[in-house]
């Protein structure tokens, strides 16, 4: 018994010490920011972003310049972020949802309309990426990064240049060689695109046909995985993968044999966007952040760090040519024209897509 | 005096039951009669029982859970028997329990390193001349990892029931001329059945709804009900269908508990 009490006391003491330590560190950090003597020294800005999706140096320089204390939180799926903002009790000033989620949040009145007079950087953006159907006239959002869905191949197993279309995946020679990202929308979408249909189709016959076509891909499928796909591809586990451009960039940094292709028959063009959610506490700081991120030099620095494509055309001029002329990251306009953004399908159709995808997963090889 | 004291101590227990067992189950039951728009419906159950996909998925889950239970039992019983006779039994038991302190995900990732195309196991197979095999994303790999994860939960109850057996009963059996095989079959195994039952429950039920391993190691080539629940709650946000599957799993668990219950023998 005495032993148990001692143990409990010991653990409590250790916890108290650690708490004190972290409190002290926090104070020290605040103090550093405050010592810059900015006008609004007590104000904080809470940002809700995807994990590892900003250059930390940018947050530091933003705090230094504006004096706001940044509170940075991360999420790993649009749905998780949506739930947290909808439930309330959170104080996010800026969030970065993907395009279909912007549409959904807009419909559910979870976003504040942006006052364009307070935005100072919109003119830097490529007009091709503004006024998208998910947010006409950018009433609620400013694009943060954009990217595509495509095919990653390993040149040890696949001849460079031999993959140009989604239909190439169905070739018998790639038996058990393909990894798919575990996402109903993306995999159903790429199958629809391979037959020249819209990735947003609400046509039962087209969807059923796509499911049939997808099932015939099963013999070639090695695995359907989520984030692990990056590790597997970097370790030469499979020859081909269907994945997002951002994931592809990460894999390619680890394995020089990997290449990324945007299939010419279309597919998905996605955007992550800065929005001000209904939970905003500090609107002024939110605008300051969005404007700061819109500055060409900041956007360029961020794009170089994160590895995704920036919608900021003035920032593109500051990036090295080796990046901006790479067709994998900045495809030709002709290819871009064939890509579609996802629209919010509503619960019933989302369910249909997922049912078909689940059925595909259950296909026996 | 004694009565009130007992009552006070039991309050946290009942509060816990109410908050974390009864309330969630009622919510789950309630949700399972809701469609995506929040209207009352019986469609979720109808979909479940009329769709080939879910029936096959149920069959898959039960089959894999059964296989994993058989594998763990086959490994755990002899192991527990040997351990219970060793000198420092508690120490060996500790070694078995130790891996449960490590997060499940970390263990799964470690297996990726072992089973991958250029993993340790394939390097060994190449070294002995068999050549690299596809190990990841197979049913075998999934069952191996699931069994590995569950083994401590099988060994612990069996070990405890073996240790509790009165050694004089075993001695008596030997004295009366039973061979060691007969002693094992007629004395030790029947007396340790309680531990086996607990172990089977502790392994079979969680394995029914394992989902991380199906994706990480099985590459979604192995689909269980857990996968479907995860999808319904996180991706499609169709909580109704997810809850329906949850309720069916709870019923399956109740059936398992009933089948493996401790049958009291009459006259004793």
Image (tube, coloured by chain):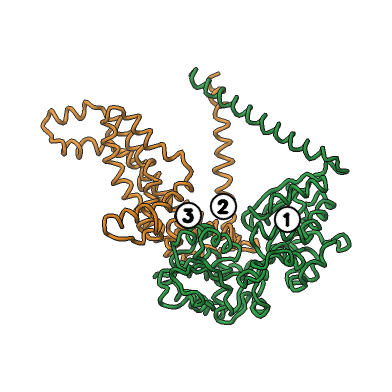
Chain colours: A green, B orange
Q: Residue A5 appears at what percent x and percent y?
A: 53, 20
Tell me the residue that label 3 is attached to. Answer: B211
Q: Is residue B244 visible?
A: no
Image position, residue A88 (x, y; %): 73, 50
Q: Nearer the viewer, mark 3 or mark 1?
A: 1
Percent across and percent down for residue B9 are 55, 27
SS under mark 1: strand
Q: Determine whether the residue tagged by mark 2 lies in a helix, strand or loop.
A: helix
**In the picture provided, is A222 more to the left or to the right than A118?**
left
Tags 2 and 3 both on a single chain: yes
Residue A130 drawn at (x, y percent): 76, 70
The CA span between labels 3 and 1 is: 30 Å
Badge 3 sits on which subunit?
B
Residue A95, labelled with which disc? 1
* Disc 2 to disc 1, C-alpha distance: 31 Å
Residues at circles 2 and 1 in contact by the CB criterion of under 8 Å? no
- N-term mark: 2 or 3: 2
Q: Residue at x 51, y 54 (%)?
A: B246
Q: Which quadrant would residue A321 be assigned to in this image?
A: bottom right
Q: CA distance from mark 2 to mark 3?
A: 19 Å
Residue at position x 53%, y 68% in the image: A259
Callout count? 3
Q: Residue at x 65, y 58 (%)?
A: A306
Mark 1 closeness class: few <14, some 14–19, many ≥20 residues within 10 Å: many
Residue B28 is labelled as 2
Q: Is residue B133 visible?
A: yes
- Report the chain holding disc 2: B
Q: On screen, A41 above or below A282?
A: above
């Amino acid at each position: 018994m005495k032993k148990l009490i001692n143990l409990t006391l010991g653990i409590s003491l250790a916890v108290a010490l650690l708490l004190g330590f972290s409190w002290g560190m926090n104070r020290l950090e605040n103090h550093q920011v405050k010592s810059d003597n900015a006008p609004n020294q007590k104000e904080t800005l809470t940002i809700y972003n995807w994990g590892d999706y900003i250059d930390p140096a940018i947050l530091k320089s933003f705090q230094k310049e504006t004096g706001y204390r940044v509170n940075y939180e991360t999420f790993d799926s649009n749905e998780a972020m949506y739930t947290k903002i909808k439930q309330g009790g959170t104080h996010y000033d800026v969030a970065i949802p993907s395009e279909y989620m912007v549409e959904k949040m807009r419909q559910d009145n979870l976003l504040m309309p942006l006052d364009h007079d307070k935005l100072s950087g919109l003119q830097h953006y490529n007009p091709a990426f503004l006024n998208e159907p998910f947010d006409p006239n950018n009433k609620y959002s400013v694009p943060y990064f954009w990217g595509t869905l495509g095919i990653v191949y390993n040149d040890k197993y696949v001849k460079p240049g031999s993959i140009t279309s989604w239909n190439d995946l169905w070739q018998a020679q790639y038996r058990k060689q393909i990894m798919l990202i575990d996402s109903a929308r993306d995999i159903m979408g790429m199958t629809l695109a391979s037959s020249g249909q819209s990735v947003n189709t609400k046509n039962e016959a087209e969807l059923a046909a796509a499911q049939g076509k997808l099932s015939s891909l099963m013999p070639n499928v090695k695995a359907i995985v989520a984030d692990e796909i990056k590790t597997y591809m970097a370790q030469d586990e499979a020859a081909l993968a269907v994945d997002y451009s951002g994931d592809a960039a990460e894999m390619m940094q680890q394995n020089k044999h990997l290449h990324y292709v945007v299939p010419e028959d279309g597919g998905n063009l996605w955007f992550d966007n800065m929005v001000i959610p209904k939970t905003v506490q500090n609107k002024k700081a939110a605008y300051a952040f969005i404007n700061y991120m819109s500055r060409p030099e900041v956007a360029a620095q961020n794009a170089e760090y994160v590895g995704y494509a920036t919608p900021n055309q003035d920032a593109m001029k500051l990036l090295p040519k080796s990046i901006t002329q790479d067709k994998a990251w900045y495809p030709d306009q002709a290819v871009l024209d064939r890509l579609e953004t996802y629209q919010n399908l509503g619960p019933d159709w989302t369910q249909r897509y997922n049912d078909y995808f689940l059925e595909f997963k259950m296909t026996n090889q | 005096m004694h009565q009130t004291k007992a009552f006070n101590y039991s309050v946290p227990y009942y509060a816990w039951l109410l908050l974390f067992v009864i309330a969630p189950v009622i919510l789950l039951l309630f949700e399972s009669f809701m469609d995506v728009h929040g209207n009352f419906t019986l469609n979720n159950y109808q979909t479940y029982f009329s769709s080939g996909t879910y029936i096959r998925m149920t069959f898959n889950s039960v089959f894999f859970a059964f296989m994993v239970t058989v594998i763990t039992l086959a490994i755990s019983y002899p192991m527990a028997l040997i351990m219970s006779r060793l000198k420092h039994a508690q120490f060996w038991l500790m070694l078995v329990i130790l891996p449960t302190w490590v997060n499940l995900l970390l263990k799964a990732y470690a297996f990726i390193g072992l089973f991958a195309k250029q993993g340790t196991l394939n390097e060994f197979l190449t070294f002995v001349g068999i050549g690299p095999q596809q190990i990841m994303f197979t049913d075998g790999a999934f069952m191996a990892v699931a069994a590995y994860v569950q083994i401590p939960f099988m060994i612990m109850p069996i070990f405890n029931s073996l240790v509790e057996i009165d050694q004089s009963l075993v001695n008596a059996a030997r004295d009366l001329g039973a061979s060691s095989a007969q002693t094992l079959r007629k004395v030790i195994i029947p007396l340790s059945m309680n531990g086996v039952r607990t172990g089977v429950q502790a392994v079979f039920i969680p394995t029914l709804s394992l989902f991380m391993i199906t994706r990480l190691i099985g590459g979604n080539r192995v689909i269980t009900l857990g996968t479907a629940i995860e999808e319904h709650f996180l991706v499609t946000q169709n909580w109704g269908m997810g809850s329906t599957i949850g309720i069916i799993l709870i019923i399956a668990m109740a059936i398992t508990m009933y089948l493996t219950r401790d049958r009291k023998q009459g006259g004793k």
